[in-house]
Image (tube, rainbow, N blue to C red):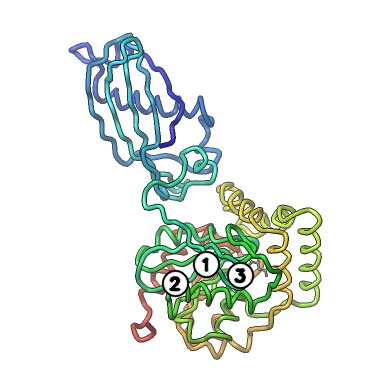
Amino acid sequence: MTTLPTVELTVYAYECDAYGHLNHATALALLERARWESLARGPGIDLFHRNGVAPVVRKAAVDYRAPAFPGDALRVELSVAERGTTSWTVRHVATRANDAVVILEADVVLVCVDRAGRPTPFPEELVGVFGPRTTGAHPTRRVAIEGAELAVDVRGDGVAVLFVHGFPFDRTMWGAQLAGLTRCRRIAPDLRGVGDSRATRGEYSMARYAEDLVGVLDALEVRRAVVCGLSMGGYIAFELLRRHPDRVRALILCDTRASADAADARQRRDELAGLATREGPDAVGERLIPNLLAASTRADRPEVLEQCRAMGRRYTVAGMAGALEAMRDRVDSTDLLSKIAVPTLVMVGAEDPTSPPAVMKVMADAIPGARYVVIPGAGHLSPLEQPLTSSRAIADFLEGLPASTA
Ligand code: MLT
């Protein structure tokens, strides 16, 4: 259990009722004060504000054990009794400082919400303060494939959906979908050389990535999966479809493109690989990431930008240079589009600067029967920037899948 700084608060006369003891409604206010005071003494009273989120109380259970009187100094010990993806429970134990009599014990369940009041996964700094997940913790699977060991998050039952991250991101970009799409089996690997995956050999290509994904499906005994790829993840999805069409039940193409790199783009890949080698993956992340997000994400949700930077830092140099090489050398998939015979959702952030809606619409029009969805207020990372709208679009698509494609 993670403990938070203990605080001492004095009971004032105006907080007490006709019997002279602490009133139950003001006791709740006192617990609230204790939580803020504890933050002020620990990570800072602006912990939530500076991360673009806020705490809201969902439930409070108080067990009153003894009366407290004006002038009593109460020692309030606080700890995180439980932590989920978006909520946590703070246990409060208030004792009178001078005789250690327990006055009350309380469990308060709080939810982390974004500026629009929507539950949102804890930003990284809050994870550091409130500790690791205690509820429904899902151990990460490790799958060994051809010189690599891939870290894979696997959750739930139902239609298998394989989430393939983009560049320079990792599987944690799908956090909201892993938490929220509870009616399907969510599978999210880190590609080789990325995040918690290790690679001992230096082979990087779209073919290698696609075979790695097949290895993940085999290890999980999944015959066919809905493949949901963002940007580079989309390039890999095309390759998987070319090599193993029988493993793809449906496609979700987010913020990606079918065309190959033009000469200038190929040259930029080499420059970035050089930068990764000379200055480390962080330098590449710094160069690329800020421009990928929507203006509103940059202005209002600094925690998203921070999460993206953190993902970029989790690449090895070989993993980053390898991904750049694989993207540089990928083949053009434009001819493949008209041959796609599985249900397809094409989803794009309205402000995506690198695979803009106009490009994605042409792609969707070329895929027989494809559904096309634009996510407002999102740039290149719609599932992360607008998690609820993106997850809703994915859930609607999954619900509409014909049973015959099982
Ligand atoms: C990505 O998000 O995967 C990248 O934008 C892909 C690319 O650089 O082509």
User: Is the residue at mark 2 in contact range of ligand 1, meaning its CB lies under 8 Å from it?
Assistant: no
Q: Position of residue 147 (x, y in %)?
A: 63, 70
Say which residue label 2 marks.
220
Q: Is residue 137 above or below residue 198?
A: above
Q: Could you give the CA–CA distance between mark 3 and mark 2, rounded to whole angstroms?
A: 24 Å
Locate ligand 1 by image quadrant.
bottom right
Q: Helix, strand, or loop for circle 3?
A: loop
Q: Could you give the CA–CA distance between mark 2 and mark 1, rounded to whole angstroms?
A: 9 Å
From the viewer's perspective, is 322 left or right of 270?
left
Q: Position of residue 266 (x, y in %)?
A: 78, 73
Marked residue nearer the N-terminal end (2 or 1): 1
**Could you tell me the amino acid type at mark 1?**
Val
Say which residue label 3 marks.
231
Q: Which residue is at a point 66% across and 68% down the rendered structure image?
A: 354
User: Is the residue at mark 3 in contact range of ligand 1, meaning its CB lies under 8 Å from it?
Assistant: yes
**Could you tell me the amino acid type at mark 3?**
Ser
Q: Residues within 10 Å of mark 1 (few under 14, many from 20)?
A: some
Q: Could you give the CA–CA distance between mark 3 and mark 1, rounded to whole angstroms?
A: 23 Å
Marked residue nearer the N-terminal end (3 or 1): 1
